[in-house]
Image: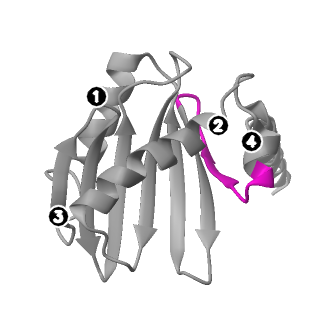
Amino acid sequence: KIEKNIFWGIIMKKIILFLFLILGIVVFAGPEDLPSYVNKQKFEENGYQIRVNKVDTFTIVKRKEAENESIVIKYNLDNKENSIRKALDEVDEKNVPKEFKVLVSKENDLAYIRSYLSQGLYINIYVAKNSKNENCYPIVSYVTPKKLSEIEIEQATQSFLNEAESFLK
């Protein structure tokens, strides 16, 4: 019986050690570890919050409760070719959920543009073709209950990409 208690004591110590290691990783890999060229203070001042922070990407979100709208900016932290390819794969109609209805799929000089309708919400996605930082490419998603015309969607490209780039130094 004593050996069994010792065995369980050792197991419990290992579990506790493991939990502390995980906690340490989470704490040190938090939003504070953004790349040095990201102006965290500026996006926080503009109402954005970090939602995802990984080694190769981070995402900030601003929710406009009164309008039931959200702006989601995801930054791929990779070179231009990989960032754009990865982003286009994510928003490709073959890879989005089946309940997403494709409304617009086009490009202009600034971005690849996709617009979807799902459960009464319009999701307009702008994948930047260029960035002022060669290793950080923004993808902006604007989620709204309002239907925008193709012209309005395209006209919004510059505004959304400028906002995304304004948070980069």
Point out the frontmost of discs 4 and 1.
1
Q: Amino acid at mark 3?
A: Leu
User: Are discs 4 and 1 less than 8 Å apart at CB?
Assistant: no
The x, y position of residue 66, in whole percent, is 61, 84
Q: Which is nearer the N-term, disc 1 or disc 3?
A: 1
Instruction: Describe residue 154's horizontal placement relative to residue 27 as left or right.
Output: left
- Circle 1 packing at 10 Å, graded few (<14), some (14-19), many (20+), is few
Q: Which residue is mark 2?
A: 166
Q: Which is nearer the N-term, disc 3 or disc 4?
A: 4
Residue 168 against residue 161 in the figure, above or below: above
Question: In the structure shown, which secondary structural element does the residue marked by tag 2 occupy?
Answer: helix
Q: Which is nearer the N-term, disc 2 or disc 4?
A: 4
Q: Nearer the viewer, residue 96 or 20?
A: 96
Identify the residue at image location x=43%, y=16%: 79
User: Are discs 2 and 4 less than 8 Å apart at CB?
Assistant: no
Q: Amino acid at mark 1?
A: Arg
Q: Which residue is mark 3?
A: 103
Res. 112 visible in picture: yes
Q: Which is nearer the N-term, disc 4 or disc 1?
A: 4
- Circle 2 packing at 10 Å, graded few (<14), some (14-19), many (20+), is some
Q: Which residue is mark 1?
A: 85
Q: Which residue is mark 4?
A: 31
Identify the residue at image location x=50%, y=48%: 159
| C-alpha separation, residue under disc 1 versus residue under disc 3 | 21 Å
User: Are discs 1 and 3 less than 8 Å apart at CB?
Assistant: no
Question: In the structure shown, which secondary structural element does the residue marked by tag 1 occupy?
Answer: helix
| C-alpha separation, residue under disc 2 versus residue under disc 3 | 28 Å
The residues colored magenta run: 44-56
Question: In the structure shown, which secondary structural element does the residue marked by tag 3 occupy?
Answer: strand
Res. 58 visible in picture: no
